[in-house]
Image (spheres, rainbow, N blue to C red):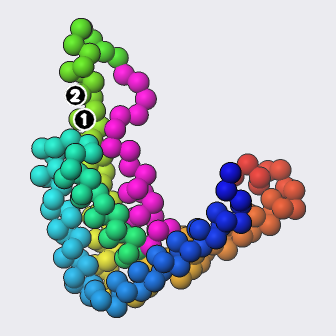
Amino acid sequence: KVPRDHRLHVRLRAAEVSAASRGRAEMNRTREQALSELDGLINKIPALHRGHAFDAEHVRWRQAVVAFLEEIFGPESNHFVSFVHLRWQPQGSFIVHGFDVEEQMEAHKQKAYLDQLDTAKGLLLAARDELARRESLRGVSRQEHGPRGKYDCERNQSRRAEVEKGDPRRSRR
């Protein structure tokens, strides 16, 4: 088992590296370049419809999106977190009709993959909308005020204080 303080150190170091790479991205990339790169990632989605989850092109595209969202918005941003939590496979169970179980399973997996691609497109379009509203890349990352912005950070601190005081109604959140 890894000591707790070592895990914290690893997370802090990862955050420092991420912040440094974001700073380099902000210095080396203009808003227009970021929008162009994001448009390219969005435009690759129709070609991905012809493939399958976790095939080479899907993995390559997914890794490019993850790197882009982390560099531009930060690892704590809604855009990044929402994208990395896409499963790209079916969730739960389903009923099989007839005897061709393998074919139905593949169809079910493909439908889930296509649904997730549509969700990914929506997430990337929302990220594009946010970038388009900004005058520059400065301040796009939410690291300046914590994970969800200054208001949510203050609200979370308030919740933590209530839990520490022992308020049982607040500890369930």
Q: Amino acid at mark 1?
A: Lys
The percent position of residue 105, horizontal first and vertical second, equals 27, 24
**Nearer to me, 92 or 168:** 92
Callout 2 crowding tier (Cα within 10 Å): few <14, some 14–19, many ≥20: few
Q: Residue at x 15, y 59 (%)?
A: 44
Dominant secondary-structure state across the stretch colored magenta: loop
Of all residues shown, which one is farthest toward the top? 99
Residue 66 on the magenta segment = no
Say if 172 sits above or below 138 in the image. Answer: above
Q: Quadrant of residue 60?
A: bottom left
Q: Which mark is residue 164?
A: none
Q: Do the residues under discs 2 and 1 have CB atoms within 8 angstroms? A: yes
Residue 35, percent from left and from top: 23, 77
Disc sitting over residue 111 in the figure: 1
Q: Within 10 Å of the Cα at label 1, are there few (<14), some (14-19), or many (20+) other Cα atoms?
A: some
Q: Is residue 82 magenta?
A: yes
Q: Is residue 90 above or below residue 7?
A: above
Task: From the top left corner, tell me how far across and down residue 108 is, in percent.
Answer: 27, 29
Residue at (46, 76) in percent of width and height: 18
Residue 10 in which image quadrant = bottom right
From the viewer's side, name the closer residue of 5 and 59. 5
Residue 67 can be seen, yes or no = yes
Residue 118 visible in the picture: no
Residue 138 spot, x, y in % from top left:
40, 88
Q: Which residue is mark 2?
A: 107
Using residue 102 as the reference point, say whether residue 90 is left or right of it. Answer: right
**Is residue 23 depicted above or below 56 in this figure?**
below
* Residue interval drawn in magenta: 74-94
The amino acid on which the numbered mark 2 sits, given as a three-letter code, is: Ala
Residue at 26 percent of width and 16 percent of height: 101
Q: Which element type, helix, strand or loop, lies under badge 1?
A: helix
Q: Secondary structure at mark 2?
A: helix
